[in-house]
Image: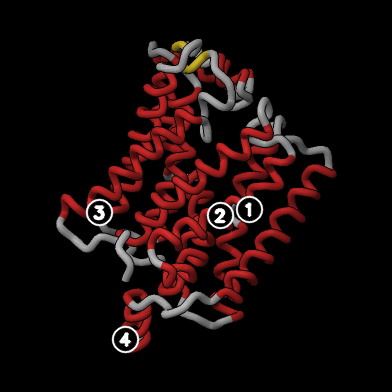
Amino acid sequence: MVAKERSEEQALRSPPARVRWRRVAVFYLAVYATSYGALGSFLASGGSFRDASWVFFAQVSALTPAIVALIITKWLWREPVAAMLKLRPWWNRWLLVAWLVPWALSLVALGLGLLVPGVHWDGTLEPAVAAKILSPGQLEMLHEIAAKASVPAVVLLVPLGLLSSVSMSFLAGCGEEIGWRGFVYGQLRPLGFWRGALATGVLWLGWHLPLLALGYGYPQHPGLGVLLMTAHLLVSSVGYAYVRERGSTVAVGLFHGTTEAVALIAVAPLAGGTDLTVGIGSVTWIAADIVIVLGLLAHDRFAGIRNLTRPR
């Protein structure tokens, strides 16, 4: 048992010397077929992006990359799962960083959104209903709770984000990241940090493209939305890859999940604008994401440690 654990730790420190493209292709095809087979069934049964059932379906579907990665790692190639997918260390300070940074991202995006002409603060959270982020029933419930607690409804976004970030959003984030940053980026890491992170981002984007084609995410501007989603996912992929290198895939899952959980803070109080200017994947969100990623990359310089962006 001790020898096995040591061999897994050695594998964690020693990434493959070359890209295993066949493994990447098998993973990608399996994830694509499973995800869009399930989506086709969902839509054929009367489901819709505008329906409340979509949120539950999306959360469950986000587990697909992790399930595929775990199956092919353990049973197809018989590799040590924790080492191959970098599920360890279970705890280091980057887990805390991964949980805190998304709050800063949302606040920066909120501030940038308020600078957009025609956008203004609306503490009633009605914009979230117009953007189909909250249902009228959910908003009414928030107002009822806020009235009983004698606090503005917008304040409740904080405990909601806290709860979701360590529950369903965390599971969904790990579901995606164990596949994309755990498996795919791990296979592409011999390309170097930048090329590996961006190549993973391109494949990750390809997984999203059919959804975008169906009008998800940018219903007002589906064409330009593809360009923004490209920028959004590539920038995010760099940040996620960095957290994987310094922490673990679990930390990346927490980062991803918390980002989704607290995004309401940056969107719900903003009235005006379009899906291109405010919201996840908008120009203001991408600008905020760039600020956060630059901050993460600057950590190497200030900490005096090996710069991941340099070729190995």
Q: Which is more foreground, mark 3 or mark 1?
A: 1
**Which of the two residues, 90 or 184, is positioned nearer the viewer here?**
184
Q: Which is more foreground, mark 4 or mark 3?
A: 3
* Pointer 4 local density, CA inside 10 Å: few below 14, some 14–19, many at least 20: few
**Which of the two residues, 173 or 194, is positioned nearer the viewer here?**
194
Question: In the rendered image, which quarter contains the C terminus?
Answer: bottom left
* Disc 3 target residue: 93
The numbered mark at residue 2 is: 4
In the depicted structure, whether residue 5 falls above or below residue 231: below
Circle 1/circle 2 CB separation < 8 Å: yes
Q: Amino acid at mark 1?
A: Gly
In the depicted structure, whether residue 86 falls above or below residue 240: below
Where residue 296 sits in the image (x, y, percent)?
Answer: 29, 47
* Disc 2 target residue: 202
Alpha carbon distance from label 3 to label 2: 29 Å
Circle 2/circle 4 CB separation < 8 Å: no
Q: Secondary structure at mark 4?
A: helix
Q: Earlier in the sequence, mark 2 or mark 4?
A: 4
Residue sitting at 15 percent across and 57 percent down?
304
* Disc 1 target residue: 206
Q: Secondary structure at mark 2?
A: helix
Where residue 207 sits in the image (x, y, percent)?
Answer: 64, 53
